[in-house]
């Protein structure tokens, strides 16, 4: 075996080992084991609300009229591909953001996708585009809230994260 062939074999083995490590460590959420997250969507929503102050200050949009922080989210919508929409406000304006969750067992880390923050609620066309570009149309969208909402003309109150059938992100 000549020296060039030996170097190529070593490089190929190194790449295979690196890819295997990458997959096994779960760093790529799309390649990680599907059942790696042991938190339900309601628990993920609560976890996000608990972590909110740790990273919401990095948003490119800042609170207005004397508000200094964005309040924790009160609606979440899981759209597939480990992504979710969240609704939040500063007491004056209401926004939504697209987040990605990296979840291992009982721990979750959230990151803002593409600095994507937008007005809330979305029009039907805006929501469809968001799902097409960032979600998984083959997965059912799941909506959660922990605040009062109108359902069939009745005010329903929720004191914990609860799944609802209403699409909370469309106008």
Image (cartoon, rainbow, N blue to C red):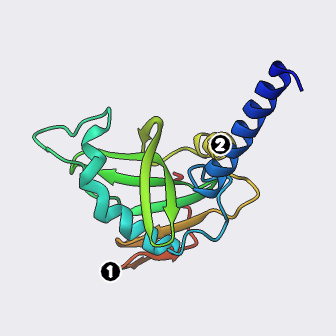
60 w.r.t. 143: above or below? above
Whether residue 160 sits left or right of residue 22 in the image: it is left
At 87% from the left edge and 21% from the top edge, which residue is drawn? 2
Identify the image quadrant of residue 57: top left
- Give the CA separation, mark 2 to mark 1: 46 Å
| Whether residue 153 can be seen here | no
Whether residue 160 sits left or right of residue 134 in the image: it is left
Q: Quadrant of the N terminus?
A: top right
The residue nearer to you, when weighing 150 against 48, is 48
The residue nearer to you, when weighing 13 against 166, is 13
117 w.r.t. 154: above or below? above
Q: Position of residue 126 (x, y in %)?
A: 58, 40
Residue lying farthest right? 1
At 42% from the left edge and 47% from the top edge, which residue is drawn? 96
Identify the image quadrant of residue 45: bottom left
Q: Which mark is residue 159?
A: 1
At 56% from the left edge and 50% from the top edge, which residue is drawn? 27
Q: Which mark is residue 18?
A: 2
Q: Secondary structure at mark 1?
A: loop
Whether residue 124 sits left or right of residue 163 in the image: it is right
For the residue carrying disc 2, how many other residues have a C-alpha within 10 Å: few (<14), some (14-19), or many (20+)? few
Q: Position of residue 61 (x, y in %)?
A: 30, 34
């Amino acid at each position: 075996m000549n020296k060039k062939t030996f170097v190529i074999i070593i490089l190929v083995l190194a790449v295979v080992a690196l890819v295997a490590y990458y997959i096994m460590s779960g760093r790529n959420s799309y390649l990680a084991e599907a059942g790696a997250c042991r938190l339900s969507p309601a628990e993920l929503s609560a976890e996000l609300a608990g972590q909110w102050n740790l990273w919401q200050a990095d948003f490119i949009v800042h609170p207005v009229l004397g508000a200094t922080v964005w309040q924790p989210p009160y609606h979440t919508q899981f759209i597939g591909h480990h992504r979710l929409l969240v609704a939040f406000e500063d007491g004056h304006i209401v926004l939504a953001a697209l987040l990605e969750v990296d979840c291992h067992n009982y721990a979750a880390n959230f990151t803002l996708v593409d600095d994507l923050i937008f007005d809330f609620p979305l029009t039907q066309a805006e929501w469809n585009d968001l799902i097409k570009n960032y979600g998984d149309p083959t997965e059912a969208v799941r909506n959660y809230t922990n605040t009062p909402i109108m359902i069939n003309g009745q005010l329903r109150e929720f004191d914990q994260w609860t799944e609802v059938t209403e699409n909370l992100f469309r106008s």
